[in-house]
Image: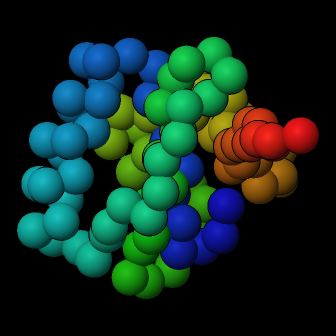
Amino acid sequence: GTPTTLLLDIDDDASLEHYNGMLKAIQKFMDIREKTRWKSKSDNTHIVLELGKELDVTARIDLQMVLGSDRKRGFFELCHVIEGANPIALFKPKEEKKGF
């Protein structure tokens, strides 16, 4: 991710519902908007959010977890930060080619 991007990995319907409510609440305090979303290979929902200002990697990981992103993944991302790496990434499946 970039300093103005959040990458969420939403695991289930309850987390998606939590995301929808929290996004509305957070939007009252900061400039944040959904840019895109897609289904992962494991049928999770991946969401990219755009921020109106830059945040450091720890703040972005915290916001991702507050918004309902996979908490175990967030914990491991924080561990990577402690070790000096920038761990935030999502993978988007290749689109299937249609036609001949």
Lateral position of residue 64 relative to residue 31, left or right: right
Whether residue 54 can be seen here: yes
Lateral position of residue 1 relative to residue 4, left or right: right
Q: Position of residue 88 (x, y in %)?
A: 69, 49
Whether residue 94 can be seen here: no
The C terminus, quarter of image: top right
Choose between 26 and 93: the one closer to the eye: 93
In the displayed structure, 4 sits above or below 38; it is below
Q: Position of residue 60 (x, y in %)?
A: 50, 57
Q: Position of residue 69 (x, y in %)?
A: 44, 34
Report the number of numbered marks: 0
Extreme residue toward the front, this view: 100
Residue 77: name its quadrant: top right
In the displayed structure, 68 sits above or below 51; it is above
Choose between 44 and 97: the one closer to the eye: 97
Instruction: Identify which residue is drawn at 27% across, 77% down.
Output: 31
Extreme residue toward the bottom, this view: 53
Instruction: Identify which residue is drawn at 68% across, 29% down.
Output: 76
The N terminus, quarter of image: bottom right
Q: Position of residue 90 (x, y in %)?
A: 69, 43
Choose between 98 and 29: the one closer to the eye: 98
In the displayed structure, 30 sits above or below 46; it is below
Lateral position of residue 50 relative to residue 72, left or right: left
Choose between 67 and 82: the one closer to the eye: 67
Instruction: Identify which residue is drawn at 51% across, 80% down.
Output: 54
In the displayed structure, 39 sits above or below 12; it is below
Instruction: Identify which residue is drawn at 47% across, 57% down.
Output: 36
